[in-house]
Image: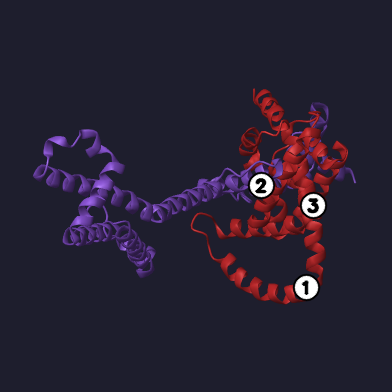
Amino acid sequence: MKCEKYQKMISDRLDGELSWRKGKRLDRHLASCPLCRNYLAAQKTIQQEALRIGKADYHQAWWLQFEQVLQEKLRLAAGQPADDLTAKENRAGHNEEKEHKSKSKKWVLRPAVVRALSLVLVVAVAASFLIIYTRQGQPEELPLTMMLSYEESYLNLGQVLGEDEATAGDFINSLEESILEETMSDENGKVPLELEFDLPLNGYQEEINNLQIEKESLKEGL
Amino acid sequence: MRAEEDRQLIEQARQGEVEAFMMLAKEYEHQIFELTYHLTANREDAADLTQETFLHAFRAIKGFRGNSSFRTWLHRIAVNLSLNFLKKRRSQNSHFEDVDRLEEEGREKELETVRKMPSPEDSSLSQEFRTNLEKVIEELPPAYRATFSLVVLEEMSHQEAARIMGCSEKTVSWRMHEIRKRLKKKLQPFLA
């Protein structure tokens, strides 16, 4: 019973909690008690060994991942949007999606581009026909504004093509070829691979149908 | 200096600033992980409990009045969560005790063989002693294990451990004495 009291003091001393006064009493007891000296030695060993166990640390990479997960959980708890790798991945995915959409948009817009180009082509061809024919007839009378005006050029083109059936046929054929070439090839003149998947036969067919309609309407106009 | 920095970060975290709270978490995550690992003796459980501790702390930080240090407050949350976890685990385990015991017996035989192998960096006696010490600590009642972890492994004062455990300093002192007696008794064959 007496030793039990001192062994409690030994425990407090190992925890750094024993007062100076009690410490003096314990030291006096230890000097005369081999049992308690043995107990103190055993407890010191246990304490030392206990401090050597249980180190369960991880590498820095593990802690980084741990912190990312924690941050995401905290953001959710705070009602904020997640701003971690997952979010970045989501953003990247979103950007990819956007990029994909814009790519798709490019192809969706393609017929419109073709139409615009075909109109430019019509103007250019019309202008060249006008120059050739007016030079033969009365070249001095063609005003510059008339050459540059789309409406006037179109009217003139109609007149010219209406007078010569062979020229009209050649014109329409060259127009058709130009449009097809533009639809099928990229700016470097190569047929894009994606076209085979994104604009397959249906796409071409649509263009050809549109062309036929334009051709018919042009003929009717003439 | 640390306390002042903590105070500023706590104030920002109270306003809902996740970044400020994350700085606090980074400061204490290793300590909390060590503590939960000592209590659960399982790394995955310790990692989950550490996450839970910070999540609880973040949700409750508006109610943190600063009567104790932030470190003590965090440790208290971690200890409470770990003790609840251990209670649940104990009740779940009791259902499968027999199966576990049979499996354990087989595993123990294998482990014993491994344990008896001399470690390159340590003597086999010391290794065996430590393995048994771990086992005895694991067998302590959860509140005793928590007290031992805080005082010996986390090197906290009785006062701080008492605040975390929600008991008096005298209780901590008596618990430590009881734990030490038990450890010596169980480890006596290795101490001779």
Callout 1, which amino acid?
A: Phe
Please state the total of marks drawn on the protein image.
3
Q: Chain of mark 3?
A: B
CA separation, marks 2 and 3?
23 Å
Callout 3, which amino acid?
A: Leu
Q: Chain of mark 1?
A: B
CA separation, marks 1 and 2?
33 Å
Callout 2, which amino acid?
A: Lys
Of residue B185 and residue A160, the one placed in the foreground of this image is A160
Residue A174 x/y as whole percent: 20, 59
Looking at marks 3 and 1 on the same chain, the residue that comes earlier in the sequence is marked by 3
Q: Which residue is mark 1?
A: B96
Q: Which residue is mark 3?
A: B83
Determine whether A169 is above or below A153 in the image.
below
Left or right: where B104 falls relative to A28: left
Residue B9 appears in which quarter of the rendering? top right
CA separation, marks 3 and 1?
20 Å
Residue A74 appears in which quarter of the rendering? top right
Determine whether A196 is above or below A147 in the image.
below
Q: Chain of mark 2?
A: A
Q: Colour of chain A?
A: purple
Q: Secondary structure at mark 1?
A: loop
Left or right: where A214 falls relative to B139: left
Report the quarter where the C terminus of chain B lies. Answer: bottom right
Q: Which residue is mark 2?
A: A73
Report the quarter where the N terminus of chain B lies. Answer: top right
Residue A161 appears in which quarter of the rendering? bottom left
Residue B124 x/y as whole percent: 56, 60
